[in-house]
Image (spheres, rainbow, N blue to C red):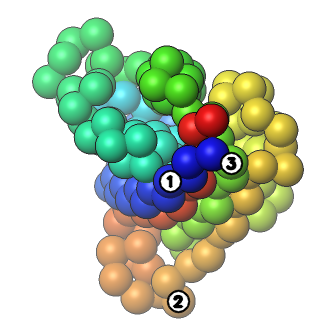
Amino acid sequence: MKIRVGFGYDVHALVPGRELWLGGVRISHTLGLLGHSDADVLIHAICDALLGAADMRDIGYHFPDTAGEYAGIDSKILLRKTMGLLREAGYELGNIDATVCAERPKLNPHIPAMKRTLAEVMDVPEEDISIKATTTERLGFTGREEGISAYAVVLIQKS
């Protein structure tokens, strides 16, 4: 069995007038993330980690923000397509370890729903997905509540 590790990172600015989507779950907040799609930084980081582990470039290569077909798209669709690309190449997910960095809103109450949603979209067991939330102790763009970032590490395997 061949195993590979991938790392993903994404960041989007927080702005008024947008919904906040994280891990495929809509979270009530006064600000939302700005982006060509729904700007779900957690899903985007996971997609980049998966694609990187399989040496398939990145999310922008497969789903460019210059393509009108992806304007406003639900990132769960991009994740489902990413899993399809991986499975076509003979890979399967081992596990995900992800961290979302945000001062507000508090994300811990939403993590179980994020895990359920991602597991369903990816067709993997929930226990293969770890999501953590942290702040930056009011430092940097995240601390000033200008944006949210996410990091993800994945293990994939090919039989």
The residue where tag 2 is placed is 137
Q: For the residues marked 2 and 1, what is the alpha-carbon distance in whole angstroms?
A: 33 Å
Q: Is residue 112 above or below residue 99?
A: above
Q: Nearer the viewer, mark 2 or mark 3?
A: 3
Q: Position of residue 148 (x, y in %)?
A: 44, 61
Q: Position of residue 88 (x, y in %)?
A: 49, 18
Residue 15 marker: none
Give whichever of 106, 125 is nearer the camera: 125
Q: Position of residue 22 (x, y in %)?
A: 58, 45
Give whichever of 55, 27 is nearer the camera: 55
Residue density around tag 3, few if under 14, some if 14–19, many if 20 or more, within 10 Å: some
Q: How many marks?
A: 3
Single out the residue that lies furthest toward the left.
66
Verify CB contact (< 8 Å) between mark 1 and mark 3: no
Q: Tell which circle, 2 or 3, labels the residue nearer the N-terminal end.
A: 3
Q: Residue at x 41, y 41 (%)?
A: 54
Give whichever of 140, 15 is nearer the camera: 140
Residue 94 marker: 3
For badge 2, the amino acid type reads Glu
Residue 135 in view of the camera: yes
Residue 4 marker: 1
Q: Position of residue 12 (x, y in %)?
A: 34, 53
Residue density around tag 2, few if under 14, some if 14–19, many if 20 or more, within 10 Å: few
Picture quadrant of residue 135:
bottom right
Work out which quarter of the rendered image holds the C terminus and state it: top right
Work out which quarter of the rendered image holds the N terminus and state it: top right
Q: Secondary structure at mark 3?
A: strand
For badge 3, the amino acid type reads Gly
Q: Tell which circle, 2 or 1, labels the residue nearer the N-terminal end.
A: 1
Verify CB contact (< 8 Å) between mark 2 and mark 1: no
